[in-house]
């Protein structure tokens, strides 16, 4: 095909040509935006086509009303002609002659040919008037009746005879002599020389079809809207004009009966590699939508479209028919009959096929289905449904958008959801009208800017890896709930860091996290890490401290000053001396960032959250008691001097990862002290570590020993604990290591002999138990009891804090 590099096609809709003022505006657009050799296709002005249809309808039964309708048509057209033309006689005379001719036709029995001849004159009269006015302005052009070259046989959707029409058009292009051609839209002619209407949106279709015939590669359709928006701009005020659409996206939008486009208009665009531009004739400066062929695009939905006049045809497949084969044959017949539905649903269990169509033509479709050459147990039709869809290349592969859309539909009376085979649309058929609120909520949820959040994990141990696995599973659900886009951008050990603003997870591919870290991580100094995080491109940055490091906790002050949020599983920062703790709190408050540390106590049990909620609700905490050390609970539950020495149990706990890396922190009470301190502070009390009386099970010089020397030095502890164990056993009591905070007295941590009925003595290994007494829970304390051990519980507590953080943001 030889494509013209200079000639373009411009098409103007009826709303752009409604009256003399609008036609003057169109003439100005033609002057500014077209060249002398361009083609111009016009629709019938304003409501002229509707008025002609009304004249035909009234002519059959009500001659008086028909004449009144005719006078209305004449008055409007002649008025606009007189306003536009200095010498309107020629155009007016042709119009009046046509009226006489058409009136005589309507005296005959109405046929398809007569109907088309009368209705098609809206385009003829408008094109003549536009052509005459342009010539008057010095914009030389020729008027061309498209029936002189455009051929199609009468059908429900007439198809232009391309080769014959192309051959007929060439002489008219040659005779134009480089001048513009003003051409009628909507109408063509069959072999019997009868007028044929090209159907709904026929003027747009004839414009792209004529452009294909004339080897034009750019078509601009001017109407009352600037192009395709992310939703109906009349319904959604913040809908965005889309500057670009792929042809297949535009085709799918048109297939779903969106009023801005029609599928047939896009057929020539698709098959002849054209570019289609949609612009507003009323506000040309307000942008446009360009529709063209593209080989690639990001996979996401671009448009929310809806239709509130949807019907449903339901077919029940007989039990003696093989369902899959029946369905395939039905689909083939539907394609042959050009009855492709907007969406469909197959229910193999109920043996039903549901097909959605616009109500405006579903009755005719239903009649055609009576000719289906397959056995049907029953068929039915409904008229009370609506359609809500998202359109965009690869939208069905965009799991985040799909999840958000499905969550929005959870509260809606859903008939079914359908995904197009090419993954370019997801369609929901609803049993109620799509209201403005639902449309706005879906649009805003999908398309408004979402905050971006970068996540940096400090620590590369088992808990950190467990949390990353949990995050990978929960990321899309978390994003859908929060409307934030999360990216894991850093994983840092004590000496190395794997850092990438683009995200770590895409780099995993088939490698484990350990393998990827080993290959990707670089030597890293704390200052380098801080500088890298400070230059981050995200809306928010969250540091997840999953270490047990005092040094890391000391960097919280810098994190706060840079506006980073911190989620801690590390107990050190929240258990700093009171002045240092307050300095951290003030730094986070002043920067507007947040520091959450629910994972520091109780693993998955929300002890900190519950204490804060009680205080913020007006309660006063009186005491907090519990088994704050998982390690000590395990040791004293397992201890029996006849089976193991206490030293043997300590080493066993350390080897199995049941204790802190340094087991002396458990045996000295330091770990329990930190947790009790954090709980008291969460309850609203400013308490320093020295205010807690701690019973250590170790000698004073234990911290100076190496770990091996420490394990070898435990013989005296064995003897001491054996004596205490036997004394408690003689009294029928149990040894337990208990932490107690009292608001009005001394807080203690130490080994106690408890009655077997005491809840604290009944705590099993791998459990935590906390007893909270307050003004509201004075007589019957609040008891929080549940599992405490394992990386999964801590990872869950970290994830809970991340969920809480996004709510705060």
Image (tube, rainbow, N blue to C red):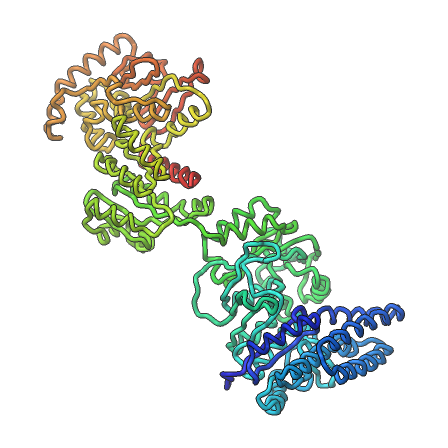
Q: Position of residue 754 (x, y in %)?
A: 31, 13
Q: Residue at x 21, y 33 (%)?
A: 661
Residue displayed at 84% across by 78% down: 103
Residue 178 is situated, as x and y percent measured from the top left of the image, at 57, 88
Q: Where is residue 352 in the image (x, y as percent from the top left)?
A: 63, 55
Left or right of 425 in this view: 413:
right
- Residue drawn 39% across the image and 24% down it: 785
Q: Can residue 154 be seen in this view?
A: no
- The number of numbered badges drawn on the structure is 0
In the rendered image of this protein, does residue 792 appear above or below residue 312? above
Q: Which of 556 and 700 is in front in this view?
A: 556
Q: Where's residue 626, x and y in %?
A: 33, 20
Toward which corner of the image does residue 648 lie, by quadrant?
Answer: top left
Q: 201 above or below 656?
A: below
- State the residue in front, 631 or 4: 4
Residue drawn at (21%, 44%), measured in percent from left and top? 526
């Amino acid at each position: 095909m030889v494509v013209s590099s200079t000639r373009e096609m411009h098409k103007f809709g009826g709303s752009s040509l409604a009256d003399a003022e609008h036609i003057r505006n169109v003439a100005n657009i033609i002057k500014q935006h077209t060249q002398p050799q361009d083609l111009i296709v016009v629709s019938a002005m304003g409501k002229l086509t509707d008025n002609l249809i009304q004249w035909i309808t009234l002519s059959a039964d009500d001659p008086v009303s028909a004449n009144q309708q005719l006078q209305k048509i004449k008055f409007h057209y002649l008025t606009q002609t007189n306003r536009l033309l200095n010498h309107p006689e020629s155009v007016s005379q042709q119009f009046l002659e046509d009226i006489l001719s058409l009136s005589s036709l309507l005296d005959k029995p109405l046929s398809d040919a007569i109907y088309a001849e009368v209705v098609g004159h809206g385009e003829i009269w408008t094109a003549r008037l536009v052509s005459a006015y342009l010539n008057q302005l010095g914009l030389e052009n020729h008027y061309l009746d498209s029936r002189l070259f455009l051929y199609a046989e009468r059908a429900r959707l007439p198809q232009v005879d391309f080769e014959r029409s192309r051959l007929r058009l060439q002489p008219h292009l040659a005779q134009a002599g480089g001048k513009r051609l003003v051409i009628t839209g909507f109408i063509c002619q069959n072999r019997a020389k009868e007028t044929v209407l090209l159907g709904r949106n026929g003027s747009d279709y004839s414009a792209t079809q004529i452009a294909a015939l004339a080897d034009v590669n750019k078509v601009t359709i001017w109407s009352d809207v600037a192009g395709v928006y992310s939703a109906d701009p009349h319904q959604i005020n913040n809908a965005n004009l889309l500057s670009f659409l792929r042809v297949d996206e535009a085709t799918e939008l048109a297939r779903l009966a969106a009023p801005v486009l029609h599928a047939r208009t896009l057929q020539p665009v698709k098959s002849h590699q054209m570019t289609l531009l949609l612009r507003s004739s009323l506000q040309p400066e307000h942008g446009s939508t360009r529709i063209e062929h593209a080989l690639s695009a990001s996979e996401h939905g671009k448009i929310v479209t809806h239709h509130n006049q949807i019907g449903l045809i339901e077919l029940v497949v007989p039990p003696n028919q093989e369902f899959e084969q029946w369905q395939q044959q039905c689909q083939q017949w539907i394609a042959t009959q050009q009855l492709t539905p907007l969406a469909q649903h197959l229910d193999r269990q109920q043996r039903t096929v549901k097909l959605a169509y616009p109500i405006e033509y579903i009755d005719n479709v239903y009649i055609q289905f009576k000719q289906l050459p397959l056995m049907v147990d029953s068929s039915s039709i409904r008229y009370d449904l609506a359609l809500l869809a998202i359109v965009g290349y690869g939208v069905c592969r965009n799991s985040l958008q799909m999840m958000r859309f499905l969550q929005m539909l959870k509260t809606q009376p859903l008939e079914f959801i359908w995904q197009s085979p090419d993954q370019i649309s997801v369609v929901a058929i609803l049993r109620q009208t799509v209201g403005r609120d639902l449309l706005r909520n879906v649009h805003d949820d999908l398309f408004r800017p979402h905050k971006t959040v970068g996540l940096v994990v400090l620590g590369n141990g088992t808990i950190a890896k467990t949390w990353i696995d949990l995050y990978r599973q929960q990321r899309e659900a978390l994003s859908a709930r929060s409307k934030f886009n999360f990216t894991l951008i850093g994983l840092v050990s004590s000496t190395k860091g794997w850092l990438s603003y683009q995200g770590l997870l895409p780099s995993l591919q088939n490698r484990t996290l350990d393998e990827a870290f080993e290959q990707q991580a670089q030597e890293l100094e704390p200052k380098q890490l801080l500088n890298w995080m400070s230059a981050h491109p995200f809306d928010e940055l969250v540091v997840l401290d999953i270490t047990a490091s005092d040094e890391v906790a000391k960097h919280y002050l810098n994190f706060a000053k840079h506006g980073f949020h911190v989620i801690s599983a590390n107990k050190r920062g929240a258990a700093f001396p009171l002045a240092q703790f307050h300095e951290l709190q003030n730094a986070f408050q002043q920067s507007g960032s947040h520091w959450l540390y629910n994972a520091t106590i109780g693993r998955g049990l929300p002890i900190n959250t519950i204490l804060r909620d009680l205080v913020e609700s007006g309660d006063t905490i009186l005491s907090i008691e519990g088994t704050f050390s998982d390690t000590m609970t395990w040791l004293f539950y397992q201890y029996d001097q006849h089976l193991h020495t206490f030293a043997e149990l300590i080493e066993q706990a350390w080897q199995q990862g049941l204790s802190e890396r340094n087991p002396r922190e458990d045996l000295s009470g330091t770990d329990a002290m930190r947790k009790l301190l954090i709980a008291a502070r969460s309850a609203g009390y400013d308490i320093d570590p020295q205010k807690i009386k701690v019973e250590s099970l170790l000698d004073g010089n234990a911290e100076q020993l190496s770990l091996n020397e420490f394990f070898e030095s435990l013989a005296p502890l064995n003897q001491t604990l054996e004596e205490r164990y036997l004394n408690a056993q003689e009294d029928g009591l149990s040894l337990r290591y208990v932490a107690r905070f009292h608001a009005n007295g001394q807080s203690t941590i130490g080994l106690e002999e408890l009655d077997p009925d005491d809840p604290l003595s009944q705590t099993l290994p791998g459990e935590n138990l906390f007893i909270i007494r307050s003004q509201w829970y004075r007589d019957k304390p609040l008891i929080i009891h549940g599992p405490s051990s394992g990386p999964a519980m801590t990872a869950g507590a970290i994830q809970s804090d991340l969920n809480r953080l996004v709510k705060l943001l």
